[in-house]
Image (spheres, rainbow, N blue to C red):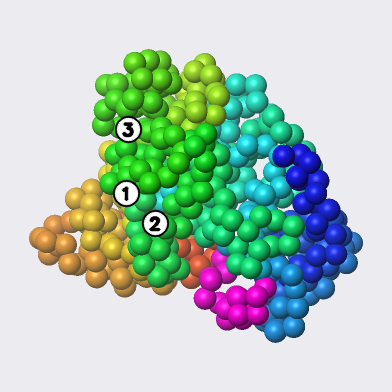
């Protein structure tokens, strides 16, 4: 594999590469390609004023720019690298296909060049928490481990640090997995066929990103690329409790390992009463820890811990390392993160919740009375189940942002909405919602930001929205 990697690296010399999008991936990819002799052009719909900082960081490189749009001349290239946010139907992408320009991505390039075996993790929710847990479990087992993909810094910039015996754990979104299919035409110096990581996991599949994927079937198909091209010696971890995922492995070559909240599995991880249990082989059962020992809140995080045990166990982690990490890991930022307690009210940041299912899981994680902050931008997802749960479990709902009217309508359509349920408020912005929450909350309440929508109506991403929530919460009670 190392010899093939060296040959492929040599193939970058003189490669005419155009990168669409100057975000984190685009910047890392531009630096990597330029360092290996490629002729790099970066194109972004944003103008130069909005990208000054990024351009300055690449100032030492011979990179050409096309900013404020995507002119046709950028297609004079051997390969067009797409950022995850660029849809397949974007005009410049359609033109590239028509002209026979190969399409690729930072993720696709990294996976082709990486000398170590990769564990890839996808799902509609829980990816980041599970990926982080797996990385820490492997690290605690003595493996030199790299974690990245859809989280952290792009791994292409760390390729020179990775050896064949290392562990690489990648969170993979449906957008990234779209690029795992066969390349047409083939990329210069790289195989044309589809590719799946030798170790894979699909945590769950529920409606998500239907503003980007044309149908639910297309969304599922993108997720399935993570195992579609596996070989017989490869393995995949699937959620035995999920109607979609438990059938995903039936038509593909890799070995199937499972995790379940509902009962034993032959190989994988499951709950034995309230004990997380690892079954490395049929007939074996290794207790890891009690669910009460987990620091993470919510039943959904028990599922994430089970998935992490199954995945890390399949990748070689020890039971002792699994226990150590599972019982000490306190969570990832912007995921049910306690920001502050003030006047008897606890404020939690769950900005990562960009779908109704994730917001439902957050609400179900609390027994305390709730003041829920919900809003953002809709992804064309169903809201009826969210509205029913909110009607049953939440005392005050504060809707904010672009989809506030949509949420108000969903709550109004719940049976019995006129005879009970939460008080519903509307605000234009998140900061206004936090201020209102502080006024209506009582001692013993939880104020929960779990929006259910994306941040793109007001913020660059869910991280920026979470940071804004933190700032607003930490500013409560201060005199002007």
Q: Nearer the viewer, mark 3 or mark 1?
A: 1
Does the CB distance between marks 2 and 1 fall below 8 Å?
Answer: yes
Q: How many other residues sit within 10 Å of disc 2, few (<14), some (14-19) or many (≥20)? A: many
Q: How many marks?
A: 3
Tell me the residue at 33%/42% (across/down). Answer: 246
Is residue 356 visible in the rendered structure shown here?
A: yes
Task: Give residue 220's mark.
Answer: 2
Looking at the image, residue 248 lies above or below residue 174: above
Q: Which residue is mark 3?
A: 260
**Residue 97 forms part of the magenta stretch:** yes
**Which mark, by number, is residue 244?**
1
Q: Is residue 157 magenta?
A: no
Residue 201 lies left or right of residue 145; in this view the side is left
Q: Position of residue 167 (x, y in %)?
A: 64, 33
- Tag 2, which secondary structure? helix
Specify whether 313 is left or right of 372: right
Q: Nearer the viewer, residue 193 or 126?
A: 193
Q: CA distance from mark 3 to mark 1?
A: 14 Å
Q: Which residues are magenta?
A: 85-101
Q: Nearer the viewer, residue 479 or 332?
A: 332
Q: Is residue 155 above or below residue 34?
A: above
Calculate the distance from the C-alpha at mark 2 to the C-alpha at mark 1.
Answer: 8 Å
Name which residue lies at 89% across and 62% down.
60
Earlier along the polypeptide chain: callout 2 or callout 3? 2
Q: Residue at the spot x=59%, y=56% of the render? A: 193
Q: Position of residue 35 (x, y in %)?
A: 85, 56
Query: Residue 95, relative to residue 440: is it above or below?
Result: below
From the viewer's perspective, is residue 225 above or below residue 299?
A: below
- Look at 38% across and 26% down and name the residue there: 267
Could you tell me if residue 445 is visible in this image? Answer: no
Mark 2 and mark 1 lie on one chain; the one further toward the N terminus is 2
The x and y percentages for residue 205 are: 37, 51
């Amino acid at each position: 594999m190392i010899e093939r990697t060296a040959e492929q690296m040599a193939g970058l010399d003189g490669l005419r590469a155009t990168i669409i999008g100057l975000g984190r991936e685009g910047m890392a990819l531009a630096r990597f390609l330029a360092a290996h002799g490629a002729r790099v052009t970066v194109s972004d719909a944003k103008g130069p004023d909005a990208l000054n900082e990024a351009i300055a960081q690449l100032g030492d490189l011979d990179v050409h720019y096309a900013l404020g749009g995507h002119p046709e001349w950028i297609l004079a290239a051997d390969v067009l690298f797409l950022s995850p946010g660029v849809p397949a139907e974007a005009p410049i992408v359609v033109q590239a296909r028509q002209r026979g320009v190969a399409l690729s991505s930072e993720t696709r390039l990294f996976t082709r060049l990486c000398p170590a075996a990769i564990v890839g993790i996808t799902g509609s929710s829980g990816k980041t928490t599970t990926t982080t847990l797996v990385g820490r479990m492997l690290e605690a087992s003595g493996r030199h481990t790299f974690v990245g993909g859809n989280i952290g810094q792009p791994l292409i910039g760390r390729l020179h640090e990775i050896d064949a015996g290392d562990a690489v754990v990648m969170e993979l979104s449906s957008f990234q997995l779209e690029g795992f299919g066969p390349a047409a035409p083939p990329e210069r110096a790289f195989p044309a066929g589809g590719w799946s990581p030798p170790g894979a996991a699909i945590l769950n599949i529920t409606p998500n990103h239907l503003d980007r994927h044309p149908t639910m079937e297309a969304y599922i198909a993108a997720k399935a690329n993570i195992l579609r091209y596996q070989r017989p010696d490869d393995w995949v971890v699937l959620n035995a409790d999920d109607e979609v995922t438990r059938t995903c492995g039936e038509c593909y070559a890799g070995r199937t390992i499972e995790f379940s909240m509902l009962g034993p599995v032959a190989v994988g991880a499951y709950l034995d009463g309230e004990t997380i249990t690892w079954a490395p082989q049929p007939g074996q059962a290794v207790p890891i820890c009690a669910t009460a020992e987990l620091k993470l809140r919510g039943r959904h995080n028990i599922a994430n811990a089970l998935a992490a045990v199954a995945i890390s166990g399949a990748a070689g982690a020890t039971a002792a390392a699994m226990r150590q990490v599972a019982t000490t890991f306190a969570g990832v930022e912007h995921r049910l993160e306690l920001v502050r307690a003030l006047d008897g009210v606890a404020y939690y940041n769950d900005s990562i919740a960009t779908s109704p299912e994730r917001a439902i899981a957050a609400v179900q994680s609390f027994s305390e009375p709730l003041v829920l902050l919900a809003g953002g931008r809709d992804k064309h997802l169903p809201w009826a189940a969210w509205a029913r749960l909110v009607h049953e479990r939440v005392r005050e709902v504060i809707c904010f942002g672009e989809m506030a009217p949509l949420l108000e309508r969903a709550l109004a359509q719940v049976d019995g909405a006129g005879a009970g349920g939460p008080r519903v408020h509307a605000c234009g912005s998140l900061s206004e919602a936090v201020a209102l929450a502080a006024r209506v909350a009582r001692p013993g309440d939880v104020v929960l930001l779990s929006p259910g929508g994306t941040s793109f109506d007001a913020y660059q991403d869910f991280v920026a929205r979470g940071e804004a929530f933190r700032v607003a919460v930490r500013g409560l009670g201060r005199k002007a």
